[in-house]
Image (spheres, rainbow, N blue to C red):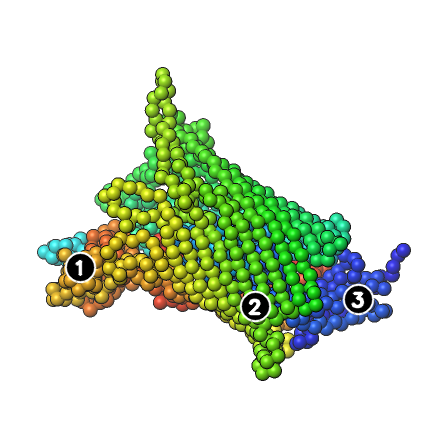
Amino acid sequence: MIHAQVTVTGTVTGADDGLAIPGANIVEKGTSNGTISDADGNYSIDVAADAVLLFTFIGMESQEVPLEGRTVIDIVLESSSTELEEIVVVGYGTAAKATLTGSVAAVKGDELKQSPTTNFSNTLVGKVPGLFAISRSGEPGRDGATLRIRGANTLGDNNPLVVIDGVPNRSLERLDPANIESFTVLKDASAAIYGTQAANGVILITTKRGKVGKPTITVDMNVGAQQPTVIPDMADAATYAMMLNELKYYGDNSVGMYSLYTEADIQAFADGSDPWGHPNTDWFKEVFKPWSLQHYENVSVSGGSSELRYFLSFGNRFQDAIYRNSATFYNQQDFRSNIDGKITENIDISFDVAARSENRHFPTVSQWSSFRMLMRGKPNMHAFWPNGDPGPDIEYGHNPAVTTTDATGYDDDRNYYLESNARVNVRIPWVKGLSVQANFSYDKHFRYRKVFETPWYLYSWDGVTYENGEPVTVRGKRGLDAPQLTQRADDDYRLTYNAFVTYENKFGESGIKAMLGTESQKGLFNWMTAFRKNFVASDIDELFAGATDQYMSNDGSASQFARRSYFGRFNYNLGTKYLAEFVMRYDGSYMFDDSWGFFPGISLGWRISDENFWRDNIAFFNDFKLRASWGQTGNDRIYYSGSLQEYKYLTLYGYSDKTYVFGVGNDNKLLYEQAIPNPNVTWEVANQFNIGFNTSFFNSKVSLEADYFRNLRTDILWRRNASVPASAGLTLPPENIGEVENQGFEYILTYRGASGDLRYELATNGSFAKNKILFWDETPGIPDYQRSTGKPMGSGLYYQSLGVFVDQAAVDAYPHWAGAQPGDIIFEDRNDDGVIDGLDRVRQDKSGLPRFTGGISASLYYRGFDLSLLLQGSAGSVVYLGVESGEIGNYYTDYAVNRWTPDNPSSTYPRAWNRDNEYWRSQGNTFWLHETDYIRLKNLEIGYSLPDAAVRAMGIQGLRVYANGTNLLTFSKEKLIDPEVGSGQAYPLQRILNLGLTLTF
């Protein structure tokens, strides 16, 4: 039968503000035929004359409308109660936000697309309350942010568990934000359902899936330019030369103030009159280019019917480094396919595949070494001679103008990932609300790394040799005598399978939901390496071309892991007024002899705004819910000295490099006992308490969520290496003896409003967390002010700086280090014994981890235009900022200009120093301890979507152009380095300016 077709048009608007709703779904009921409204809320769809249209949009009540002969249908969608309707992803399922009792932060995927960073973890900075995201480096391929949920909680591993599409222990750094549907953080007892891996919190990410409707093709592409947020400002050649003169003078006053460089020399450095003999080199300018390139492309296809839905995504991205003639770059290609199908009315299946290729390319000299040399780059030395030849080395053959290029060889690191999920969900038809779900995932990873190191060449000039009136430079080999090659191959996999039964039903106003399941996970990791040296030439970079015998080596090993678990959750609600949840997990881990542990969590909620006494007297609040929770989680990823302590309950053996002879002509490797076992080693235990509330007022335009938390971490792995004297001759194994307390608060305040065609949203969030060590092994008898107990983890032990000795009289008047002289830093005599020694050092109250992080965001929409911005900041952290200066390297301009000299005795900065030769450089002290509080314009995006009439004329569904940027402006007292990086010898964060285009077909 052929049905007559008609074209139906109309506009979709909201009842609250009368504004157009872009992106509303309009589907012909009972078919896969559908469309979405454009930026102005308009739609057009061809349907059967007797069709019924279904209008849906997130946060709005759905409507079914029969045509009844009409061809123009304007729809006004009513707002649903946002919290009642909003669904949040939780462990092994979903929950209505209205009935949540735990501390859970959720962000929609579209909110994470506004930052042009290539590493997804950096998009999280300042956006999620309770999630401390700190970017420490901008180096392509190695630019991941440090993620901490509610700060630091242990002396060991503080990384949260990441669960992607229900599969634990996947990585989030290289996800494409265009593929992310939701991002959720479990911060309290709600994480107990993940047991021994949940002590540091859990991050849940779901990727996008197909929606019913005709295929929608989206193309997103952008290109950007990067530059460092801060380039260190170093002293010029004239200033540096004068400081070297001062150093010589302070060592021997009889030589005078111009013993190394005369006043004429210093003038020549300043005016550039002798570029060969008196250079004035800006090393950062010589090594960095003004801008570097990055670009991104993604194509996605989504659609399907009620029987089969699909989401496909293809992505590519490239990021160059900031060096001139750079050997550093990162390139990625990724693919995702999420398929959902309906076998019968009660059986659903899905199959997901994600593949990713990552190529990291570097020079053989690390960025740390290059930046160390850049900071030490002497301005009176050449990076390049005036004739273009590379200048001499700063130290160890390193000239960063050369070692940041491929002149030293290459380090090529390629990684290939395959992640797959298969899922089946069966609804039991004869028991209402009963379903069974089973999941299986297989993740595979290959890594191939090839490091080919070659000699490089620099040029020197003796200052006197000329040819035809031009200086003659001499080429010299640096680095290795001959090329060498190291190759490594990794091959690992991870299997995860779980199954759980869920029952959900309502009995009058009471609702219950129960879930019980089991999960197993196992994996294997293999690696092997091969090394050859003394290549005859660098033309052939393969193993066979290297020398053999003593110039070759091979190595390899393997490891495996396994976990098995049983978990459950029970929820009860009386309407939305009284709420309760109990979660549990019984976990078995391969890490311990006593491998099983039980981890419970309980939370309660009371929607006090549903009580009559509240409604009758405090109607100002539309909603007010109190929450409280307690839970116990574990951490089996126990680290000590940066190493995962696997199988420490066993006596572990290893092979030595030494051999012994057994039999005729047989060299046998020596097997030896590596460490004393600890049969009682176990997981860390986290006791987590949380109390908070959710509220909304002003007709739900304003919402506020706030929490207070206290976490107590016990059984932290640590050695008794302080209370047991070294003279005992014992090497004791680590024990579960450490205890740390962490407490704080967090909030998010949001306002949503509209005025005419303008819609806007303003929000601010903040998180404060302060930890302190309750117990670890410390030397008996040390002063209280030096103890780590009661202080934050990572806090330093330093002499307190009291300023600078202005003259000899000041030196004589106060206890001082032996040999102190005017211009030196004054150390406080903390114990008033008249002597400056190790007992005067004081444990500080801050560390490199901020105590407060937060953000202020704004989003505006007006007639096709959109704007979003994020101000982000942190407070409460410090960095120890010392520079290897003097004869060995340059000084910060700030230090140089403001230094103490005999003519400037009132300066607050010390005199010129020579590396660590001065006591106030070799001994840690608070003069070099800088506060790194800052506020930053983290993200800004401006976009425009063409009107529906314009895009229809072009034969497409939508077109949006946009410009965005990240790390655009920074306000901080710390000017020498980027305050977020926390180091002067690291690849800087990048300021990125981006232009993009999104097409929808």
Residue 35 % position (x, y): 73, 61
Nearest the eye: 160 or 434: 434
Relative to 681, residue 108 above or below: below
Q: Which residue is drawn at 20% across and 52% down?
A: 917
| Whether residue 621 can be seen here | yes
Residue type at tag 2: Gly
Question: Pointers 2 and 3 in contact (CB under 8 A)?
Answer: no
Q: Quote the CA–CA distance across marks 2 and 3.
A: 47 Å
Count residues near mark 2 (Cα–Cα under 10 Å), then give few for <14, some for 14-19, many for 20+.
many
Residue 997 % position (x, y): 60, 59
Mark 2 sits on what residue?
A: 605
The mark closer to the camera, 2 or 3, is 2
Mark 3 sits on what residue?
A: 8
Q: Quote the CA–CA distance across marks 3 and 1.
A: 87 Å
Mark carried by residue 863: none
Relative to 355, residue 783 above or below: below
Residue type at tag 3: Val
Relative to 600, is 275 on the left or the right?
left
Q: Which residue lies furthest to the left in this view?
A: 254
Q: Residue at x 37, y 60 (%)?
A: 772
Mark 1 sits on what residue?
A: 836
Relative to 388, residue 108 above or below: below
Residue 19 % position (x, y): 67, 74
Secondary structure, mark 3, is strand
Q: State which tag comes first along the sequence, 2 or 3.
A: 3
Relative to 546, is 179 on the left or the right?
right
